[in-house]
């Protein structure tokens, strides 16, 4: 992945770290504790029903870049650590050919940080546009998933349209709203963020 490092510092208390097998138990417990909320919107939750399943899920994600170094799409699953405790997950799928990336995210109820996911997105997008070749970042979410859509809207992403029944979520198909921001648009957004939150 062109992207950054395995550990990304977001603030004094928050960091992203690529999930490793050592995180299996903490990840399993967090997903299990928040299963009912997460399963409404996330496809892979049932893979983490057991410790073995969770280990296999993490392992598969770790192996993909090693086994497919030439694939144009690479995916990294990060854990979100708040004061050293795992509180959520952040997925980045990079499209190397087109210099674009897609974000996915979730957090457990134990996170106390207000605006956690928004803060992470701001830091990451800024870093990706400043120090890498990325030109476009996307967020996809079901139109009914208001909190998730609100993150993209709050970040000033542009709504591009709807992918119809693009995801099979257990027993039904869901649409995805597609939101994006381009490198050339981001510096204006960042100024607004600096004024609002710092
Ligand atoms: C999607 C999900 C991560 C959104 O969580 P969230 O708490 O709404 O998102 P954030 O952490 O960015 O917090 C947003 C709030 O913080 C505020 N905020 C944003 N940046 C801030 C900052 N820098 N400082 C203070 N507050 C801030 C926002 O105004 C917003 O406030 P509100 O909730 O009162 O409207 C969460 O609902 C979840 O895990 N859902 C289940 C999984 C899921 O749906 N994943 C997405 C699949 S597409």
Image (cartoon, helix red, strand yellow):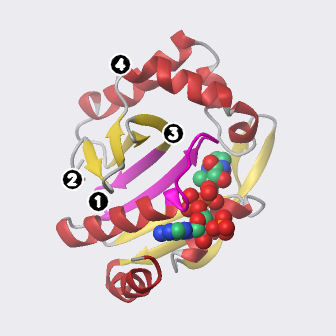
Q: Which residue is mark 3?
A: 87
User: x, y percentage for residue 139?
Assistant: 53, 63
3 vs 4, front mark: 3
- On screen, residue 65 versus residue 34, left or right, reads left
Q: Which residue is mark 2?
A: 2
Q: Which residues are magenta?
A: 90-117
Q: Which residue is mark 1?
A: 97
- On screen, residue 23 versus residue 170, left or right, reads left
User: x, y percentage for residue 175?
Assistant: 73, 58
Whole-number angstrom distance, CA of label 1 to CA of label 4: 32 Å
Q: How many numbered markers are drawn?
A: 4
User: x, y percentage for residue 128?
Assistant: 28, 65
Q: Residues within 10 Å of mark 3 (few under 14, many from 20)?
A: many
Membership of 110 in magenta stretch: yes
Q: Secondary structure at mark 1?
A: loop
Q: Secondary structure at mark 3?
A: strand
Q: Earlier in the sequence, mark 1 or mark 4?
A: 4
Q: Residues within 10 Å of mark 4 (few under 14, many from 20)?
A: few
Ligand 1, image quadrant it occupies: bottom right
Q: Is residue 178 visible?
A: no
Q: Residues within 10 Å of mark 2 (few under 14, many from 20)?
A: few
4 vs 2, front mark: 4
Question: Farthest left residue?
Answer: 131
- Relative to 148, is 161 above or below? below
Q: Earlier in the sequence, mark 2 or mark 3?
A: 2
Classify residue 19 by image quadrant: top left
3 vs 1, front mark: 3
1 vs 4, front mark: 4
* Dots 3, 4 in contact, CB < 8 A: no
Whole-number angstrom distance, CA of label 3 to CA of label 4: 16 Å
């Amino acid at each position: 992945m062109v992207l950054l490092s395995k550990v990304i510092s977001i603030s004094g208390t928050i960091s992203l770290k690529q999930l490793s097998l050592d995180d299996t138990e903490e990840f399993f417990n967090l997903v299990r504790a928040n299963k009912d909320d997460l399963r409404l919107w996330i496809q892979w939750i049932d893979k983490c029903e057991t410790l073995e399943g969770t280990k296999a899920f993490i392992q598969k994600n770790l192996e993909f870049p090693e086994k497919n170094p030439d694939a144009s799409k690479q995916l990294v699953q990060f854990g979100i650590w708040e004061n050293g405790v795992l509180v959520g997950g952040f997925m980045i799928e990079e499209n190397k050919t087109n210099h674009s990336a897609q974000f996915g995210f979730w957090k457990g109820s134990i996170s106390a940080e207000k605006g956690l996911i928004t803060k992470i997105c701001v830091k990451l997008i800024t870093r990706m546009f400043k120090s890498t070749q990325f030109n476009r970042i996307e967020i996809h979410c079901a139109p009914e998933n208001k909190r998730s859509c609100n993150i993209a809207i709050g970040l000033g992403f542009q709504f591009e349209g709807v992918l119809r029944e693009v995801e099979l979520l257990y027993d039904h198909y869901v649409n995805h709203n597609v939101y994006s921001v381009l490198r050339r648009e981001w510096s204006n957004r960042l100024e607004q963020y600096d004024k609002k939150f710092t």
